[in-house]
Amino acid sequence: MTSSPAVRAYAERTVEVRPTTARIDHQALAHNLGRVLAHVGPQCRVLAVVKADAYGHGAIEAASTFAAHGAWGLAVSLVEEGVELREGGIHVPVVVLGGVVPGSQDVIVHRQLTPVVWSREHLQMLAGSVRRAGARPLPVHLKIDTGMSRLGVLPGDLGPMLDWFCSDAGLSLRLEGVMTHFACADDADDDLSSARQLSVFADCLGTIAARGLRPSLRHASNSAALVRFPSARYDMVRPGIALYGAASGPEVQLSDLRLAMEVGSRVLAVRDLPAGARISYGGRHQLNRDARVAVVPVGYADGYPRSMSGQAQMLVRGHRCCVLGNITMDVCMLDVTDLPDVRAGERVILMGRQGSETLDVHTLASWASVIPYEIMCGISKRVPRHRC
Ligand SMILES: *Cc1c(COP(=O)(O)O)cnc(C)c1O
């Protein structure tokens, strides 16, 4: 079926008029990277973590900003995410944290991604691919599991991997980096387990050096660790959440960061409802006074968690207004009784600042009983990102 020009024009306009949007502040991204660079000093590089679409901020755009403002390279979780960056014209090193899934080795070599490796199978797959392609030696980063018990080679199993690197002699793979990851870096009460991990890592670095291998990039610290453990900075740090202006907790937050994402919408309709009316699914919220209720086109399908129902607030004209009743898939209801003349089209801030009020990602996370990462990554594809 062919649609008339008028219908097509309308359809295009409706795509553009979705009132619920996320504004991504690239000056804030650059500023936060600058804060990390200044904090760790000129000897230490920064691997900017842009996995999960740069924590919801848009991978290619965020990656370009970080690359242009002094990041040594970028880290993603998946090969697919690395390919997306390459297709987007990103040429700096891209480290794939999630390892080498069988079948991905040719793509890794072809796209010149830098895989994290922790088994001899990884090495054999990659080396085979490098040889078949007649490619230059591929840089890889060896991950050691020093106590997180997630990814990495256990220290006791390091020997056979080092044997492999020694016999390859850098012909197919180049051991560029060695890394580990802390389990409790964001727990301000924990020093012991992180100190133990650091000492295991130091032992492993000693073992590697004793075999004559000279990886130039040793790295261990995420955003929290780069604040808490100066001795764990080594040659490079791997911040994610700090670059987006947040932290896993107030004790581990770098000072003077700026939140880079603002989520806003516009009032879809205003309703005058009588005392006693029940609001939304389940009817759990009953009005105890005559009220004006603004309907806002935001719901859990946009990543505004339903579990915040009963606690969430939004900003209208710089005032906090309560979300009434259950948050639904597409819509929620806001009490604007105390704000005269709120009309359809009025701007609403879900996350960000308006006037002197701020609702930051940590506040939303506490309402939803999740960590700030989940709020950031959860803002769905249905919410257009606008660069500002
Ligand atoms: C996600 C991730 C990071 C970044 O963590 P933040 O807490 O966001 O700074 C660093 N290293 C690894 C291995 C990761 O998976």
Image (cartoon, helix red, strand yellow):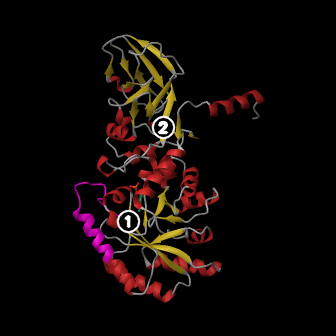
Where residue 11 sits: x, y (%)? Answer: 68, 31
Residue 74 to residue 283: above or below: below
Q: Nearer the viewer, residue 367 or 235?
A: 235
Foreground tag (2 vs 1) = 1
Q: What stretch is highlighted in magenta?
A: 181-202
In the picture, the disc for residue 152 is none
Mark yes or no: residue 4 visible.
Answer: no
Q: What residue type is disc 1 on?
A: Arg
Residue 135 magenta: no
Q: According to the image, label 1 marks what residue?
A: 233
Quarter holding the C terminus is: top right
Residue 310 to residue 78: above or below: above
Residue at x-position 22% and y-position 64%: 192
Which quarter of the figure has residue 183?
bottom left
In the picture, the disc for residue 262 is 2
Q: What residue type is disc 2 on?
A: Glu
